Image (spheres, helix red, strand yellow):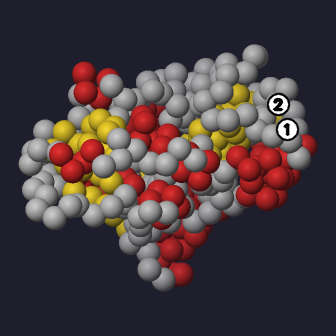
Amino acid sequence: MPRRLVPRTDAELATAAAVAAEVWRGGGLVAFPTETVYGLGAAARDAAAVAKVFRAKGRPSDHPLIVHLPDVGALERWAVDVPPVAWSLARAFWPGPLTMVLRRHPAVPYAVTGGQATVAVRVPNHPVALALLRAFGDGVAAPSANRFGHLSPTRAQDVLDDLSDAPGGDELLVVDGGACDVGIESTIVDLTGEHPLVRRPGHVAEAALAAVAGEAFAAAGAAAAGQDVRVPGALARHYAPRTPARRVAAGEGDRAAPDVAVLARRTPPAGHVGAWATLPDDPTAAATVLYASLRALDTEGAREVWVEDVPDTAAWRAVADRLARATHPTNLEEGP
């Protein structure tokens, strides 16, 4: 079984950080909390350690990882030709749930970048994550701490449920920092082209980015000439429960059969039979509990999960993105 540390005091956190740093220096894996989701981290300069991340998750080796940095000052050790807009965004949103795609520093292993000439970096805004990264003193490559394509973990128990029986899972160190505040993965912006481009929507909205950058950001999912960059979490099917899931129109959950679970922004109608999870009618609050709600429905033994549509507005874009990937048709055709 993985080893679990639950730091609750400053002294316990200092000890956990020292232990985690030693594991990373020895080429091992540490699952740790960030404000978005739990990450599965390896020393980013150790290609052999990074390979363990891919094996544990069952992740394709050409799917790049995000390098988590201890502070903004580490950026130039991981990226080159950093544009002024990147520094402006870093000052505004780091530490925080923003990942920037930049030109890779020559010293960055291609194992981290999926073989690309770009690297994805961020500084997380979580006291446990920052303590661990600062104790280690360098970058940690960390995708979400779950099996590839499945629901991201927002609690330490989710990590244990997903990875205890994964390759190398018995040697995994899990640092328990409680539930994640944001609940969905970071916004990813690509700054390698002529214009900034949002590759994955998240807690940091396009309007906030534009206000700092002084120029508009292309909408999530848009294509741009010369910016054919692969980024984490951008596959058509991702963040999916094991139970086949489909999107339905708002209100359709009322006709769900007893063996169909429903996720909606409202309570079930009177007399409804079957599993039902209610999301808050606020996009930020809904994001925080989204994966926990889907995980709960995933344990109900339902034949399917019906996910009612959320509003088609900028405020709901990040949640809508995750739900679109979780309910992509391949989820019904191929299973998880």
Is residue 3 shown above or below 223? below
Q: Residue at 73%, 57% (x, y): give it.
A: 93
How many other residues sit within 10 Å of disc 2, few (<14), some (14-19) or many (≥20)? Answer: few
Q: Residue 198 placed where, x, y %?
A: 68, 37
Q: Is residue 149 left or right of residue 127?
A: left
Q: Amino acid at mark 2?
A: His
Verify CB contact (< 8 Å) between mark 2 and mark 1.
Answer: no
Residue 14, by quadrant, is bottom right
Q: Residue at 44%, 75% (x, y): give it.
A: 7
Residue 10 shows in the view: yes
How many other residues sit within 10 Å of disc 1, few (<14), some (14-19) or many (≥20)? Answer: some
Q: Nearer the viewer, residue 37 or 194?
A: 194
Q: Residue at 38%, 72% (x, y): give it.
A: 6
Residue 265, by quadrant, is bottom left
Residue beneath disc 2 = 195
Q: Residue 163 placed where, x, y %?
A: 30, 46
Quadrant showing the C terminus: top left
Farthest residue to the top: give it: 225
Residue beneath disc 1 = 82
Q: Amino acid at mark 1?
A: Val
Q: Residue at 74%, 54% (x, y): give it.
A: 208
Q: Is residue 123 left or right of residue 320?
A: right
Q: Residue 302 placed where, x, y %?
A: 13, 44
Residue 23 shows in the view: no
**Tag of residue 230:** none
Mark 1: secondary structure: loop
